[in-house]
Image: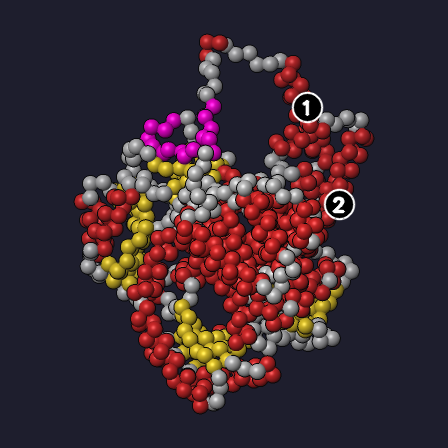
Amino acid sequence: MNTEPFFTPDEKREFFSSCRVLMSRLESCLERDDVKKMKAFVRRVAAFDCYGRDRNGINGLLRNIRTAVIAASDIGLRRTPVIALLLYRPVYMKIVAVEEVRETFGDDVALIITRLLKTSDLYARNTAIDSENFHHLLFSFAEDVRVILIMIADRLCMMRMGRQIVDGSARLRLATEVSYLYAPLAHRLGLYRIKSELEDLSLKYIDPDRYNSIKAKLNETKRSREAYIAEFIDPVRQRLRAAGLAFEIRGRTKSIHSISSKMKKQQTDFEGIYDLFAIRVILDSQPANERSECWQVFSIITDMYQPNPGRMRDWISVPKSNGYESLHITVLGPRNRWVEVQIRTRRMDEIAERGLAAHWKYKGLKTERGLDDFMNDVRALLENPGANPADTMRDFRMDMYQDEIYVFTPTGELIKLSRGATVLDFAFAIHSKLGSRCISGRVNGRNVPIRHTLGNGDTVEILTSPQQHPKQDWLAFAVTSRARTKIRQALREEAARTAEYAKELLQRRLRNRKIDIDESQLMRYIKRRGFKTVTDFYLEIAEERLDVNTVIEEYLDLERRENAAAEHPETRSAEHFSPPPPAPEKTPRGDELLIDIHLTGIDYTLAKCCNPIFGDEIFGFVSTQGIKIHRRECPNAPEMFSRFGYRILPARWNGEAAAGYAATLRVIGHDDIGIVTNISSIISRDGETALRAIHVDSVDGLFQGDITVTVRNTQTVERLIRKIREIKGVKQVSRLHR
């Protein structure tokens, strides 16, 4: 008998506190007796252990209420989706029927639960990012935006409880999925605060060393950063007060994930990142004065500090499609440091921080045309028949993260496009037929080619020809997911028509020569010729790169050889017969693969992309060349976990290390005479390392070298790094991921 209490004292306090918060958020939109009915449902299903603890020890009811609070407080979901969220688990476990929910709370609650059940069913089938299941998962999201928002709330709840997930590989999979899908979705839907938190938590579990390093350095520099913010803000505050404006001004440190991305993009360390924070001016303006007062602040700040024209962003004149409004400028502050300044009103700030939640508060859901346009684009992308799931996901993510520009038709209609969009993207945005027939454009009265990149405020006219049709090279410069989807669809349709023509040609020639073809043998012939698909084979014939008569002769020759082999099988002597090696035992999905020098029967190799060393945290990846062993920090790890989760094997080192592993160290320092000699000397004196290669560059008095050594384990590498750091003139030593 299970004597464990349903709630611990701390959990009980948190549960009732969360319930009070949830009630205060939903009080205005709940119907009569909703609370009474919900209490009855919860009491009933709790007796069936519906909300029992999962394998991580997390209480199901507490997780449910935490998610509901996030959905109501941070996202702004109201009665229907929150009730559906709370009742989903009992319906999923078949303790409560959907029909009973429909009778008690209405059709809309039942509909959301049904769509959540479909989503759970897809997750149960292991939805690797490039799989058809994930394609269907996204489509179920696109059916109802509330399903996306509930899933975002649930993933944020789980990421906040990440330390309670005892299975490290499950935690890593969750973090990778969140960074690949849910953080971009939150970004696209205007949930910027949630997006930043999801990205930071993902980095915390995917690359804890990098996360903790940046966090520690932010804490170390906090005092000097706050002093600089005060130095920048004080004169601005005085000028704004003198202008009679009501405002709040504050500095905000950028997220750890944002700083990490800048470090990677700029290929620099933490000390090389200068824009670690942004200054935000929030005005208490009346609706009629919002724009004019924002521009007044812009004028005051740019009078005080030199602006960077290339970094100016105006989302007040034309807001983003998700409702985001703000003026962004970058100015040269004291001590010649660039500082980003964001100017907005209180209403704009609430929308920017809380996205849809605030937008619904100010305008109501039905006015969200931008959101509807986005969901329509998603549906169009996913409804494309025969689409490659990997291409779909790439376009889907690209479209979510693109900034926006606004251009005009000749009649003055405003069209929103992704930044970097071309004349061709504009044509497809108007109509797919216009895009397919586009030959050039006229931008601001000047003739331009279809690959011309458009800018904000351009007026665009499309020129067409009935002889034009989509071409493969269009994909090289089309940016928007709509254009890319339509181009791929047209290319597939054209390829199918061409392949059908070639197939009829081959069949006609075979009939003329009175040859009956065996389809299975034809498939073997196509495979032997190296074609990946039957369509590729027929396209070669249609484009006359493969002669039909040659195909027929080679097919007949293959048929004769196979028939001859069947009639005269090769005889072999028993004297030289050796039985085939036993098949390697498969590693059970729940077990760990133990890697050591005594491992036999498993075909594995160390991945070249990250060069794991004995002692590294590792995982196995099942490939066509056997099992590849990768480091947890491998740059390809996030994509492998998100796209091919079903191929991942838990693994760890065991026993003894092999003779040696290759490791590459990046050394940066002052270009002093003898620094290379000193490094080589330390390596040669270390009995457990051997120098394999060294590549050195020297620019403007700085030395940078990549040194490849053979080591026994990670302890040897760490010891070597410590010794090299002690050399005079060496500023930085790190182990490369490759």
**In the rendered image of this protein, does residue 236 appear above or below residue 669?**
below
- Residue at which label 2 appears: 497
Is residue 640 visible in the rendered image? The answer is no
663 to the left or right of 490: left
Tell me, yes or no, whether the highlighted magenta stretch contains residue 125. Answer: no
Q: Which mark is residue 559?
A: 1
Q: Earlier in the sequence, mark 2 or mark 1?
A: 2
Q: Position of residue 670 (x, y in %)?
A: 25, 62
Instruction: State the quadrant of the N terminus.
Output: top left
- Tell me where the magenta segment starts and ends, as one range: 583-600
- What residue is shown at x 77% (from left), y 30% (from top)? 510
Q: Is residue 200 visible?
A: yes
**Helix, strand or loop status at disc 2:** helix
Q: Please state the horizontal and vertical placement of residue 516, each as a whole percent of the image.
A: 77, 26
Callout 2, which amino acid? Arg
x and y percent of residue 176 in the render? 48, 50
Q: Is residue 63 left or right of residue 44?
A: left
Locate residue 95: give its quadrant: top right
Q: Which quadrant of the view contains residue 337?
A: bottom left
Tell me: 182 left or right of 102.
Answer: left
